[in-house]
Each structure stands twice: as C-alpha cells, then as structure tokens.
Amino acid sequence: MKKVAIVFPAFATLIFAGFIQPIDTMLFDETMDVVTIALLLAWSAPALPAVLVILRIALPRPASPALIWPVAIAVFLAGLFLTFASTVLSSPHSTLLSLTHGGALSLAGASSVLCLAIGRIGSNGVRLALSGMALSAAAAAWSLLAVPSVVFQAKRISAGYPLCISHHGPSLDVSSIWDLRGFDFYTTDSGYKSTSGWYFHGILIVDGNDGRQYFNWSPRRFRFDRVEHPERFIASLRNLCEPSSAFWSEL
C-alpha cells in the first residue's frame, strides 16, 4: 500500500498534467452518438489513473483479481483500437507521435485498473502496474518538457522581435502555455491525400528586420526549423496569427 499511496499518485498526477486536453464541444455537434462516446472516453482517459488510484487508497480492501484482470485487458485493447482508428486518418508525419500518445494513455488506463487489485495480484501484478504507469509517466514528462523547450527556442529565434505561435492543422491560436505541451503541439491533420505533408506541427512567426519569417516546430528534434518559401504551401501559413511584442504576457 505504501507504493500505492506515494508512487502511483505521483505518476497519475504527471500523466494528467502531460496528457489532458481541452475538450472541443463543436465535435459533438458534428458526430454520431457512438463517435461522441468514443471522443468522451478518449478525452477523459488522462484522468482515469488519478481517479482509480484515489479509489484504491480509499477502498478498505483490494478488488478481486478475477474481475480486475479482464477489465484491465479490455481497457488496454479498447485504447489501442481507438489509437489505431485515429492514426489511420492522421498525417504520416505524425504516426509515431499519435501511436505513442494513444499507446501511453492505453497503458496508463490498464495499469491504473490493476492498481485496484494491489494486495491480491501478487508481486508480478504490482510490477506490471508500476511499469505501465512509469512508462506512461515518462511519456507525460516528455510532453511537459516540450513547454520550456518551445519557449526557449522561440525567444532565442525571435531575439526580442514581435512573435506569435500557432497550431497549423487545425489552425488554432496558442492561447495558453499548456498548448505547447508535446502531446498538444503537433498535428494529426492529413488533408486526406497521400501527399499530405501540408500541415506543420506548430508555427512560430517572427516579424524581424528581414521581414516576416516562419518556423516549424519539430517534436522529434525539440526545435524550430525555418520554413522556406511559405507561400508555396496549400494550407496557408501567413494568416495563422499576428506577431506581437506582448505575446508571452498574453498567454
């Protein structure tokens, strides 16, 4: 129980902070009931480990392994199914990120379900739950570490000139520092064509002495790369956001 009371809550908190996303209510108006339920499940997944760990601490005795093992497996498989379903429609440049994102959440959900039976699932079960939560927490830590990296890179490149940062696909302003987390600051848009490299993960726009310059965020390299000839791209970069000297203070 000591691990449940200390280590698992720490992992669950990290997972929540690294993965939770703002909910887009407009999607629910455009989708069927089954899809709406799937979207709600996917959106609430980062909170599941915290809820289940708190529940385990509150329970006077562990749940039955005969019940928990099938539920954990079902949660993991359902998460993988939703992950693969969403990855099919995403950009090929985002496949690895999408799989990591969904896979880590699926693992976190299944591992947290196993937490409910700690005390009755044996040492191997505890190690499995701990390993799953640790891997998911590591992915969440990567997501959170993207924030200071984006801020540092953007400040270095802009060198005090007006700047702004925006998502490219879909085109959304970065309105909070949380929007710069690794699992939030990448695109899954594909254009639904084989030549789908239209969309960048995130765009930094700088108004400097040499005019307006555009930079794409690379999640793999953790840096902004200069976008040459931005006018050539089908999905326009020019009107994503308006550079401002007060950009950081407005977040």
Image (tube, rainbow, N blue to C red):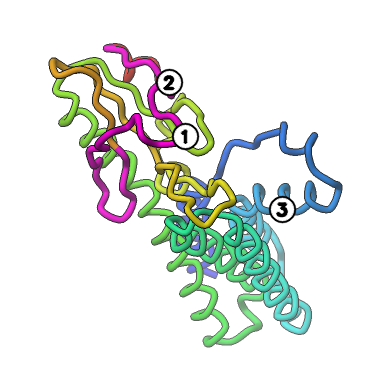
Q: Would you place residue 225 above or below residue 121 in this image? A: above
Q: Are marks 2 and 1 in contact (CB under 8 Å)?
A: no
Q: For mark 2, what is the residue?
A: 239
Q: For mark 3, what is the residue?
A: 41
Residue drawn at x 79%, y 43% as measured from the top left: 31
Query: Which is more toward the observer, 124 or 18?
Result: 18
Label 3 neighbour load within 10 Å: few <14, some 14-19, many 20+: some
Which quarter of the rendering shows the C terminus? top left
Q: Secondary structure at mark 2?
A: loop
Residue stretch in magenta = 216-245
Quarter of the view holding residue 151: top left
Percent of width and height locating residue 125: 57, 83
- Seen as rendered, the residue at the extreme front is 232
Q: Earlier in the sequence, mark 3 or mark 2?
A: 3
Q: Would you place residue 19 above or below residue 86 in this image? A: above
User: How would you classify the magenta stretch by its main secondary structure?
Assistant: loop
Residue drawn at x 28%, y 30% as measured from the top left: 214
